[in-house]
Amino acid sequence: MLLTCQAGYEGLLARELAELRGMAALETGPGWVRVAAASGAPEPVAAQAGAEGRPWFPSSLVFAHLQLDAPVEIRADSVNALADRVAEDFFEAVRGERIEVAWPCIWRGPAGEVGLGRRISAVESAFGIRLKRRLARVAKLARPDLPRGVGPVHGLFVFFADFGRLFVSRAAFVQGQQRMADDELAPSRSYLKVEEAYIVLGREPQAGETVCDLGAAPGGWAYSAARRGAQVVAVDNGPLKGGADGHPRIDHRREDAFGFTPGPGGFDWLFCDLVEEPHHVLQHLVEPWLAQSWCRRFVVNLKFGRVDPIALLRELESPVSPLTRHAAGLRIRHLYHDREEFTVVGWTKR
C-alpha cells in the first residue's frame, strides 16, 4: 500500500504503522509512506479481500489520509510519457467495466515541493486529453474531488513521489481528512478543524441541538455550530471574536472550562480544543463528560506537542482509556488542518 499524510508527519505515520499496526515501512518520502504487511497482519491487497471482494485496509490509522491499494509504480522523464503510461494502465484496468456514475479522478503529490504542482497539473491535463479521445463518456463522469466521508472508494488515484515517479491505483480508502473552505466570519483558523471533524464523524450539529464548547475563545467552533442552527454555550474567560461575538445562538459564559458543570439533560454535543496537557484534559474533562453522559457526541482536540504522540495514541486506544470505556464510534485522526494534535470524535455509550 501507499499511504499519504501531512508532509512532515511521515515519520510518525511510519512509527504508527510499525509500533501499533504491525506493518513495516518499505520507503518514506515527503507526505507518504509505502508499506508491506508484517508477519501476522492481513495482507493489504485485493488477494486478501473480504467476502465482498473489497481490498483490506487498516481503517483505524490516525496519521494516514489516503490509502492506495496495490499501487502500480510508473517512472518516466516527460509529461507525455507519464500520461501515456497512466492512460495505458487505466484503459487496461477498465477493459470490460461499465462506468455509469461519477467516479473520483484524484491527482496528488507532496505539498511544498517546488514546481511539482505544475508537473502534476500538466500530466493530469495530458491524461485527460487521452481519456476524452478514448472514452469520452467516461471522461465526462470523472470528478476531481474525493467523496465526503470515510470508507473505500473506487476510481483513479495518482500520487507523485517526485517529478518522474508516480504511483497509480484503482482502489483507495479515505480516512475523512479534507481541506475545508474558510469562512470570512470565522474568528480563527480552528474553525476549519471542526468543519473537517464532522466529515470524520459522519455527523454535524443540527438546528435545535445543543452544544457546549469548552475553551471556546475566540469562538471558531461555537460559530461553526451556531451557523447550522444549534444553540451553543461557549465557556471561556477570554473574549469571542468575529462571527461568534454577539451571535444570537451563542451564550458566552465567562467561566473556567474545567469547572463548568452542565445542568439536567446535558448537551447533544461537547466541543473542546484547549491548549492543555492531553492527560489533564482526558482525566479532568473528557472522562467525566463521557462517563456521566453529559453529552451525546463529542469533538475533542488533544495536543501532543510536548508528549510522544505514538505513546499517547497507544494510551488513547488502550482498554483502560476513558475513550475506550465510555465512547462508541471512536475515531482518532490527524486532520489536514491539525498541527501537533489529535482530533477525537465519537458518541457516548448509554
Image: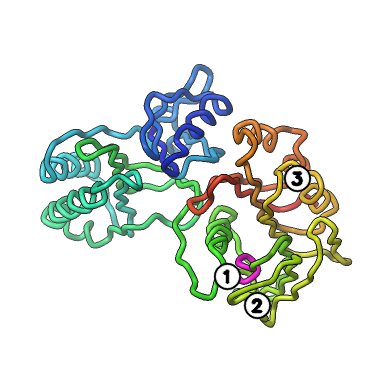
Mark 2 or 1 closer to N-term?
A: 1
What separation in Å lies between label 2 and label 1 (alpha carbons)? 9 Å
Judge depth for marks 3 and 1 and give the one in front. 1
Please, what secondary structure does the residue beneath circle 1 have? loop
Residue 273 spot, x, y in % from top left? 66, 56
- In the structure shown, which secondary structural element does the residue marked by tag 3 occupy? helix
When asked about the image quadrant of residue 219, the answer is bottom right
Label 1 neighbour load within 10 Å: few <14, some 14-19, many 20+: many
* Mark 2 residue type: Asp
**Residue at which label 1 appears:** 187
Residue 288 to residue 59: above or below: below
Does residue 227 belong to the magenta stretch? no
Q: Is residue 99 left or right of residue 229?
A: left
State the CA–CA distance, disc 3 to disc 1.
26 Å
**Image point (56%, 45%), residue name:** 340
Q: Disc 1 marks which amino acid? A: Pro
The residue sitting at 29% across, 49% down in the picture is 107
Report x, y in % for residue 159: 31, 42
Residue of label 3: 282
Provide the residue span drawn in magenta: 219-223
State the residue position of label 2: 245
Does label 3 or label 1 sit earlier along the sequence? 1
Residue at the location (25% across, 46% down)? 116
The correct choice, above or below, for 331 with respect to 29 in the image is below
Location of residue 179 in the rendering, given as x and y in whole percent from the top left corner:
44, 57
Distance from disc 2 to disc 3, alpha carbons, whole Å, reads: 28 Å
| Overall secondary structure of the magenta section | helix
